[in-house]
Amino acid sequence: MRKLILLSLVIWNVFIAFSSNNYLEPKTNSQDTLRIYHLDELVISHSVRETNDLRNLPSSVSILSPRQLQNNRIESLPDLSAFVPNFFVPSYGSRVSTPIYIRGIGARSGAQTVSLYVDNVPSFNPSVFDFEFQDIQRIEVLRGAQGTLYGRNAIGGIVNIYTLSPLTFQGTSAAITGGNYGQFSARASNYQKLSDNFGISVGGFYKSDDGYFINKYTGKKVDASENAGGRVKMEWNIAPRFKATLSSNYDWLSQGAFPYMHADSSMVNFNDPSSYDRNLATSGLSLQYRGRGFSINSTTGYQFLKDDMKMDQDYSPLSIFSIQQKQRQHSLSQEVIFRLEDNDHYNWLIGVFGFMDNRNINTPVTIKEDGTAFFSGYFPPFIKMLNDEIEMPGEYKKPTWGAALFYQSTLNELFGVRGLSATAGIRYDYEHTKIDYFTETQGVGVVVTPPFPPGAPSMPFTADTTMTGGFSKGHFEILPKFALQYRSSETSFLYASASKGYKSGGYNEQAFSQILRSAMFEAIDRLMAERMPGMPSPFPPRPENEPTLEEQLSYKPERSWTFEIGGRKELFDRRLSATFALFYSQVSNIQITQLLDGGTAGRIITNAGKSTSQGVELGLRYAPASNFSLFGEYGFANARFDKYETTGADDEGKPIKIDYSGNHIPFAPQHTLSVGANYIHRFARGAFIDRFIGNLSYNGIGKIYWTESNNVYQPFYGITSASIAAEKGIFGLELWTKNLFNTQYNAFFVEVSDMAGKVNPIVQRGIPTRVGATLRMMF
């Protein structure tokens, strides 16, 4: 039914195209219309957030045009992996977690080290990072700490996504795709000017697949998905110097999730539901006033997230441990930037930013019959569990707010030297975070049969525990930036820069699984002491100098400095372009994800000392002819712990100190490589085909260490993708494949202990070969 609805939308947009003036009276000025099929590489002159031209930033930046996105079938952030040097977005089983790694810096869960902006509206939760691209005008990836202009959670970099403007692009596009594994998608969009000063665009999409992995327990695919959404954008030139843009986007997702299996298995095999459902709505209002030599830009953003994740936490057919997480989040942001521009000698900007983020999390955890049976092993023989299941519901409210003031300026012709410029900036940033918690155990009952005196009657106990309260904290950050640049010509420059960034601290709501377990044992111990005086405690004593509850929940902000040298050179009338960057990043209080009790009590974010990341990035693009181009992008990042000491247990369960200093940071790839070619053949007028397009690419990623001990890793692997397309008039037909040679690799690995203490290696396999066809129409 949904497919019929989306097909109807496609037909409706096609009808609009034929009946609109934009089709009946095509524009005579081709510069007013951006045709995706014929769009050349974009040349962006400036950004409202920068005091330098975007192409000549004293920083590592990659800009992707609509043609690049279409040629390489980049439809979401994970598809960008390796196309940008040292850029990696893995898939960890569902879209609830979409970490972004840049230069070995990333976060598997929690707040991110790379922030995402869509039309200058920030996203506050990595659960919203993986969405279907719609009508993208360009994507910018800025690598290295970007704290001065962007603030929190940008120590690795920034991803800026911009959508097409209905004032500069008019027309209708539609596409239908089908492929193996039940792949189907339909999308359509219409861009129109209702007057010379007002334009509107409307678009929608639907996408589904049957999944790639079978659950042996159910005999069905475990990771089937459906995704649909729509977008509306309006632009109004209210006055010659005053412009307003209003955009709204909605995204609905329902997917089977977490196709995790034992490393020695070829099939998923678990019994409890694993899924992820998401409703996401984002709106932004941008106001721009361009005066004589200056501009004022205001962006107001709002985002609403409501999702529901279910996970079989033991990843087995046993009924041990399951978890559900529901998020409900309202995020509001406001930014105003005053920018001096069109000055050949000196440019500067000053801005203010503020946000409020209210996130409510509901995480009911269930310890099931096989889990309670394992729990009995913690007890001496005279204590037995009464119930088969223990429920641990929890509700956590995590309001966060912040404010910032920032400034940046660029002085050209420094010391009178032509081509030499200096950029400096600073940001004052304050953030306040809070957690209000309510959690409890339900169904904790035991029966105690005293071992003495002989024949003593058994006594039942109910030992449920409730915990409620709250904590809050705030921190202040100063984020400077310095850069020098020398432009020897219009086609070459060198730069050196230093910048600071930080990643927010916060509180671990998932730590309550372990805390409640300890509270449950204490409650049993306390009741026994009250009702059975003289009975020795069956549990070990609490450790001395145990941290407070707030200390157990809290983790500190992560801070970084990035130092970089780079440049660009263009030759042969800009047909050959080469870029390079050398970088060194220092991170203190690095945040890592840590499994509690081997994964049987959830996970937390903790601080792990210091780390460094150093490496190189190289880019090369060459167009020997107007219809043929080659590209190559390579990144190397050597990211290691400088200082990381923690505690563990030996084979007998005794605590020991573990030193991971010098080890590679897990989950971050050491190498990324992307090479490819694009060919276009234009046929003579009157031929059966107007254009033939061929694309070939190879993307390689690795080595990826999966653990802090570096004992398990994914070797370097590469995926080959290809497409051929034929175009005639308004129609285009494309045949494509991804992972052409069915490369086998692991997308995720984790070591999980069952409640009996056995460590199980759990993996998520990579997606196999996909093939399909896409029919496009462009008016």
Image (cartoon, grey):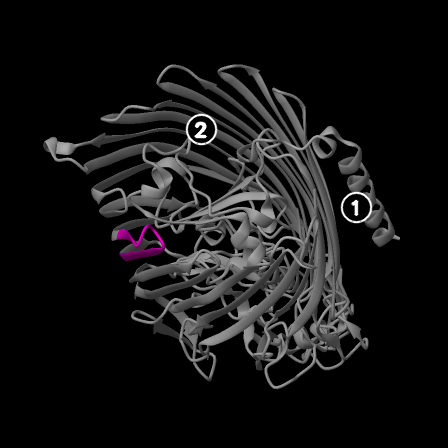
Name which of mark 2 and mark 1 comes first in the sequence. 1
Which residue lies at the image location 82% right of the left edge and 45% below the top edge?
A: 11
Query: Residue 150 appears in which quarter of the rendering?
Result: top left
Q: Which residue is mark 2?
A: 353
Query: Residue 296 appears in which quarter of the rendering?
Result: top left
Amino acid type, label 1: Val
Quarter placement of the C terminus: top right
Name the spot of residue 218 as percent of width and height, x first.
81, 75
Crowd around label 2: few <14 · some 14–19 · many ≥20 (10 Å): many
Name the spot of residue 584 as percent of width and height, x first.
26, 57
Q: Which stretch did the figure color magenta?
A: 567-582
Name the spot of residue 62 as percent of width and height, x first.
41, 50
Which residue lies at the image location 60% right of the left edge and 66% below the top edge?
A: 723
Nearest the eye: 437 or 92? 92
Report the number of numbered marks: 2
Q: Is residue 573 magenta?
A: yes
Amino acid type, label 2: Phe
Residue 318 lies left or right of residue 424; in this view the side is: right
For the question of whether residue 183 can be seen, the reply is yes
Q: Is residue 492 above or below residue 385?
A: above
Q: Which residue is mark 1?
A: 10
Crowd around label 1: few <14 · some 14–19 · many ≥20 (10 Å): many
Using the image, tell me which numbered label, if any, was put on residue 730: none
Q: Is residue 76 magenta?
A: no
Which residue lies at the image location 67% right of the left edge and 58% below the top edge?
A: 687
Name the spot of residue 589 as percent of width and height, x first.
35, 54
Q: Is residue 54 above or below residue 744?
A: above
Seen from this angle, which residue lies furthest right? 1
